[in-house]
Image (cartoon, rainbow, N blue to C red):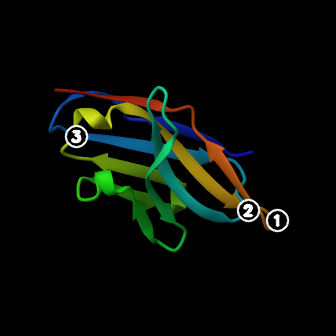
Amino acid sequence: QVQLVESGGGLVLSGGSLRLSCAASGSIFSLNAMGWYRQTPGKQRELVACMFSGGTTNYADSVKGRFTISRDGAKNTVHLQMNSLKPEDTAVYYCNLQEVTKLGYAEDYWGKGTLVTVSS
């Protein structure tokens, strides 16, 4: 079973920066991707950024140029550097890990979430 532990959320002023980290533990058969999603009350969880095992990244349009995802493969840790934060970035941020199992299907794991609050 894979467990994800997030850290780094908090309160920051508009224009400020935060760095989120997520450490994965447990047995991973074949890692497909790690990334970050966010959710606000009444809305669906949305992709913020992800990095595939080969290094390809994908970002939401709303964060391109401001957020950077990176991964320490040896430690199965993923980071999200968030710069030029805006009040609309306020959300609970969830770490995600997608594994390809021995049977060949994708399985998603989620962290418990960390709150990021950006005040204007």
Question: Looking at this view, is 35 or 19 the one in front?
Answer: 35
At label 3, the amino acid type is Leu
Give the quadrant of the C terminus: top left
Q: Is 97 positioned to the left or the right of 72 in the image?
A: right
- Residue 78, given in percent of the width and then of the height, sits at 46, 52
In what element is the residue under mark 1? loop
Question: Looking at this view, is 18 or 84 the one in front?
Answer: 84
Q: Which residue is mark 1?
A: 102
10 Å neighbourhood of mark 2: few (<14), some, or many (≥20)?
A: few
At label 1, the amino acid type is Lys
Comes first in the chain, label 2 or label 3: 2
Comes first in the chain, label 3 or label 1: 3
Q: Residue furthest bottom?
A: 54
At label 2, the amino acid type is Phe
- Give the CA distance from mark 2 to mark 3: 35 Å
The residue sitting at 49% across, 37% down in the picture is: 6
The residue sitting at 69% across, 46% down in the picture is: 2
Residue 17 to residue 70: above or below: above
Give the quadrant of the N terminus: top right
- Give the CA distance from mark 3 to mark 1: 40 Å
Q: Are marks 2 and 1 in contact (CB under 8 Å)?
A: yes
- Residue 30, given in percent of the width and then of the height, sits at 69, 65
In what element is the residue under mark 3? loop
Checking the image for residue 29, the label placed there is: 2
Q: Which residue is mark 3?
A: 85
The residue sitting at 61% across, 65% down in the picture is: 32
- Residue 68, given in percent of the width and then of the height, sits at 32, 56
Q: Is 106 positioned to the left or the right of 86 in the image?
A: right
